[in-house]
Image (cartoon, grey):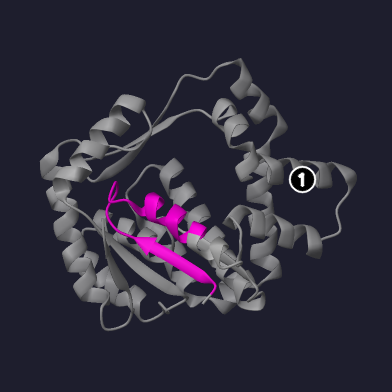
């Protein structure tokens, strides 16, 4: 299928293999696009907009494009993510004057507006029971509201992407943290995680090609320490937390194996 998704514990190498898969697809002359580009372009083709919305949409399209990666890295604040006492915490670098520009233009807000409009246009809640159940589960989570809001946005973005790709088989997209990975994140945070999976699994489908990325736990520790130094991405508290995440992944795999097909990649 034209949708490829990777999952695994943090720092296992999902982004690395995402880049390799994209290169492989492009070498076979396949059209491969980032999920945000696919979603924004679909929005522009299907909605009538005033000049301001068109301008903001194309600005977002440029900002999220690969060609603007240097510009994006300058204007975006670095973000460290940690898990402590079974809660997710975000810690961003200090805001500087150039970060105020992104806030003023409202690129992230525009993208969120696009997602909300497409949620209604594509009848996501009506057509995807999984999404309705996930929303309820997110609402009931004992987590920070910022994290819950982001989790909802990630799920909505991913399901909208899948819906678009079903109708456009000539384009491809590779996701390093898709539906299954986000469900795994929730599984890790839920006290009654087995009951959570039993509820979810009934509505979970094989949307495309799914790959589990596995690697040596010591390698994960090394990558986590590097992220800590660079103040970038999810950072483990210690090696014991890595082991715990891996054990949860083993349980998660067993619970989904009869419903979801996936291949393994050793990193």
5 in magenta: yes
Q: Which residues are magenta?
A: 2-23
Q: Nearer the viewer, residue 85 or 154?
A: 154
How many neighbours does mark 1 have within 10 angstroms: few (below 14), some (14-19), or many (20 or more)?
A: some
**Which residue appears at 43% of the width and 65% of the height?**
5
- Residue 205, given in percent of the width and then of the height, sits at 42, 79
Residue farthest top in this picture: 97
Residue name at image x 19 percent, y 40 percent: 221
Q: Quadrant of residue 247?
A: bottom left
Magenta span contains residue 126: no
Residue 215 percent location from the top left of the image? 21, 54
Q: Residue furthest right?
A: 51
Of residues 60 and 170, the one drawn nearer to the viewer in this rendering: 170
The answer to whether 226 is drawn above or below residue 131 in the figure is above
Residue 13 visible in the displayed image: yes
Residue 64 showing in the rendered view: no
């Amino acid at each position: 299928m034209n949708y490829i998704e990777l999952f695994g514990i943090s720092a296992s190498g999902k982004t690395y293999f995402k880049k390799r898969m994209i290169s492989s697809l492009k070498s076979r002359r396949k059209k491969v696009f980032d999920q945000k580009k696919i979603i924004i372009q679909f929005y522009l083709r299907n909605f009538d907009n005033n000049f301001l919305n068109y301008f903001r949409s194309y600005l977002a399209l440029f900002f999220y494009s690969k060609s603007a990666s240097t510009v994006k890295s300058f204007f975006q604040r670095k973000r460290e993510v940690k898990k402590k006492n079974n809660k997710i915490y975000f810690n961003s670098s200090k805001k500087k004057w150039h970060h105020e520009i992104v806030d003023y233009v409202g690129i992230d807000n525009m993208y969120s507006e696009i997602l909300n409009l497409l949620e209604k246009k594509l009848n996501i809640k009506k057509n995807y029971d999984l999404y309705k159940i996930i929303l309820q589960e997110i609402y009931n989570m004992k987590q920070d509201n910022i994290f819950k809001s982001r989790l909802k946005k990630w799920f909505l973005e991913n399901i909208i992407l899948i819906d678009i790709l079903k109708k456009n088989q000539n384009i491809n997209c590779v996701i390093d943290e898709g539906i299954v990975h986000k469900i795994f994140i929730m599984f890790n945070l839920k006290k009654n995680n087995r009951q959570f999976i039993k509820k979810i699994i009934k509505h979970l489908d094989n949307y495309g090609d799914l790959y589990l990325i596995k690697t040596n736990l010591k390698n994960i520790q090394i990558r986590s320490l590097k992220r800590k130094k660079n103040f970038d991405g999810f950072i483990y508290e210690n090696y014991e937390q890595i082991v715990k995440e891996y054990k949860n992944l083993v349980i998660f795999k067993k619970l989904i194996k009869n419903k979801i097909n996936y291949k393994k990649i050793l990193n």
